[in-house]
Image (tube, rainbow, N blue to C red):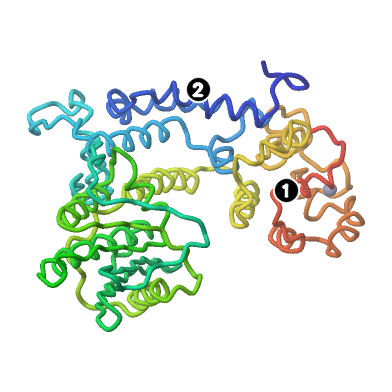
Amino acid sequence: MIGDRWGLSPDKICWVFNAIIKPIMTYACVTWAPRLLDNKSLMTRLDRAGNLTLLMASGARRTSSQEVLHTLFSFLPASLELEKTSLLQALRLKSLEHWPNLQVDHTVRKSLEPCCYIIDRILNKIFTNYNCHTNDLTKPTNISQKNYTLEINGNDMVPLDPINYIITTYTDGSKHSDDSTGYGVAIFIDKETRMTENYTMKQHHTVFQCEAHALLRASILLNDILSSPSLSEHRVIIYSDSQALIKALSNPYSISKTIIDLHNSLNDTASTHLITIEWVPGHKDHYGNELADKLANIRAVVPNPTLSTNQPNIPHTFFKNKVHKYTNDKKNKRWNNSNISKNTKELVSAIVNRNLQGQHLFKLGFDVLKPLTRLITGHNNLNHFQNKIDFTTAPYCSFCEDDVHETAMHLICDCEYFARTRMEKFGEDPITIDQLMRLTSLTKKKDLTVLLDFIGDYEL
Ligand SMILES: [Zn+2]
């Protein structure tokens, strides 16, 4: 299916790997992969098998450093991919209460340990004593029995005023770019009487959780208010500007503790009074919504020392992100410890510093990608590398008469032969890789092809 000048294009090869091979390779890997993680020779073989895709798609030479290719194309080696997927599968299984609860037997030889011990040990290392009960993800729970009603009307809906036995309530949550969070609740019992509450939330809470917690607090406060005999005939409309929240509540099942708790509280409050939760468009100058928004934002900016009770659990995405970071750090450590040539390391680091690496490079097409990868990895037809594999070739530059090795860096940065092209294109000669990256202000991913411009049709 794959050849030099025929067959699948690089991005299709990458797609086949991500969509078909990877899922097969990692299917239920939590049950077997952890036992193999310590087996270095097996893992190296697995990595090599995974790297085949990378070699085929990029056109790199087989001798190219794996670390360079992994970094350049943001690929995880197969061994790390298995570790990451095992950890993610374990997080999910634990929350869904499908994880075996084995007593740790310290007499068991390490090589015979069950996979769940090994996974537990890694999870405890990442999260310092991981406890699945702090995770918001839980097993699917039926929330279809609703005493309250949910409504999403058009953008032109107008919120009602607190008259004629109607109590109106507005809730809002907020999260700023620095991860500060807060929520606000405003309850209008009648034209004169109102009640507000706003608290800071924790940094790991999502804006969705802030919105949900605001609604939960409104429900708890209303339960208290409605117990007064003078309000026994009243009904309540709660306005929230989060459609996602109302849609989450309208599902028959939920796997989020936040939503399940909220549903139970609303059902409780709605057992005695009519309660409607209606969507109100945000930032449309509806007084109550603006007030709730302000209340939430103040608490995000000016935190109060205490937190409200029953704050939501830590979102599942928070744990997932930490696992991703853990495996990425491991990959970066391999890159930092790898012994590749200084030239290649400098070039790849410059590319990474400008955030130009990634799987989007596969979109470049084989004609461009192959020479580009060979240029960056240093494993190419230039004399410097040819000399390494075959001593009959002299390592010196064949373009200029200088006594320098013919490397990609030399051709791009300071080879006399390309001086004019360099001046024309960048107004700078000679040029360092850092200068080149800055001068060309490489913002678009495809601009990496600028590196090829000097070499033209020269067969890499
Ligand atoms: Zn030269």
**Residue occupied by mark 1:** 448
Residue 197 spot, x, y in % from top left: 25, 75
Q: Is residue 427 left or right of residue 344?
A: right
Residue under the image location 33 percent in, 64 percent down = 203
Tell me which corner region of the image, top left, top right, bottom left or bottom right, holds residue 182: bottom left
User: Camera-side residue: 221 or 46?
Assistant: 221
Circle 1: element type: helix
Q: Residues within 10 Å of mark 2 (few under 14, many from 20)?
A: some
For the residues bearing labels 1 and 2, Cβ distance under 8 angstroms: no
Q: Is residue 333 left or right of residue 133?
A: right
Ligand 1 within 8 angstroms of badge 1 C-beta: no
Residue 209 spot, x, y in % from top left: 32, 57
Residue under the image location 68 percent in, 39 percent down = 378
User: Camera-side residue: 264 or 336?
Assistant: 264
Q: Is tag 1's residue or tag 2's residue first in the polypeptide sequence?
A: 2
Image quadrant for the C terminus?
top right
